Image (cartoon, helix red, strand yellow):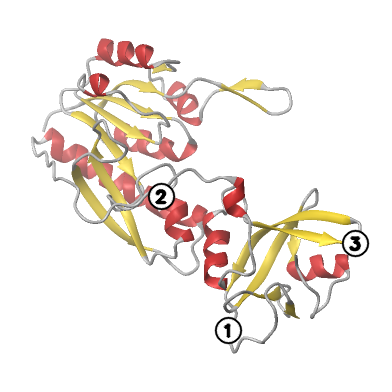
Amino acid sequence: MSKLKIVFLGTPDIACGFLSRAAAAGHEITGVISQPDRPVGRGLKLCCSPVSALAEKMCFSFFKPASKQELHAVISALKPDLCVVVAYGRLIPAETLALARFGFLNVHFSLLPRYRGAAPVQWTLINGEKTTGVTLFWLDKGMDTGPVFLRREEPVLGSDDAASLFARLSASGADLLEEGLAKISAGEIIREPQTGEASAAPKLTPGLALLDFSLPAAVLLGKVRGFSCGPRARFNLELPGRKAAVQVLSAALPEGPVKDGPAGALLSVEPGGGFIVKCGEGSLLVKTVKPEGKKEMSGADLLNGLRLKPGDMLR
């Protein structure tokens, strides 16, 4: 087995474990590329990405190209055998993809061609899927359309939210990447065309996070789970002389028969600290919330603070 010269492209924290795993597998990391520093906080202080910070800590050469031309020039100079991409955040032009001897290998958190796009984990939960997985595939000029190298299925647990599913898929994906690198260094390269029905996983927007209680409870629960990493699922309260947005941090489908009532009606306050609200179909147990400008609290504490009781309406 031969050692590979790898250029790693990634930006957020979720990519850091993959960089560490590629390095631990004994391959040569000739360069690490992430997006340029961004202003953060009230002072808009420039802050480097988690991947850049890790590359510096591990004493790897790192680069933050600000344009496609700069990216092309960096990779051309590094002359890699392989480029590994995990949540880099930018499309890579076809002429740049041709620079690596074996190509660009991308880790995607779904079973392609399902959920192509920026938010596959979130949309998996929003749509109530029972199975997902990780795909190791070769980049081409399309959006997540390239041939598949390896893939691994992972169940979606009823207790999962976006954070827990991301964590499990990241661990599974790191194992899959290590397996893929071993195969490539041994001369075993697979390029299978994607098959099956394709679906999209576009970037989440705050407008999509709004909870409309006229919708089925299962749909609303999917939003709470899928939006757990932000923007949070929320509903708007309209009280006399006051409006407020309330983020829903955790929820569930209550057990037992569903009480009758109009959509948006408060049905009961539960012993565990949540409350049950009637939906267009079924009902939703709202466990923990965060009202605008306030700290996290139980659903029951929210109702007590607002002096709401069963029979009142959430609008």
Amino acid type of the residue tagged 1 in the rendering: Glu
What residue did someone put label 1 on? 255
Relative vertical location of residue 52 with respect to residue 180 in this rendering, above or below: above
What residue did someone put label 3 on? 240
Relative vertical location of residue 111 with respect to residue 128 in this rendering, above or below: above
Of mark 3 and mark 1, the one earlier in the sequence is 3
Q: Secondary structure at mark 3?
A: loop
Q: Is residue 103 visible?
A: yes
Q: Secondary structure at mark 1?
A: loop
Q: Residues within 10 Å of mark 2 (few under 14, many from 20)?
A: many
**In the picture, residue 184 is in which quadrant?**
top left
What residue did someone put label 2 on? 120
Front residue (pair 171, 303): 303
Q: Residue at x 19, y 52 (%)?
A: 195
Q: Residues within 10 Å of mark 1 (few under 14, many from 20)?
A: few
Of mark 2 and mark 1, the one earlier in the sequence is 2
Image coordinates for residue 127, horizontal then vertical, percent:
44, 62
| Image quarter (top left, top right, bottom left or bottom right) of the N terminus | top left
Q: CA distance from mark 3 to mark 2?
A: 40 Å
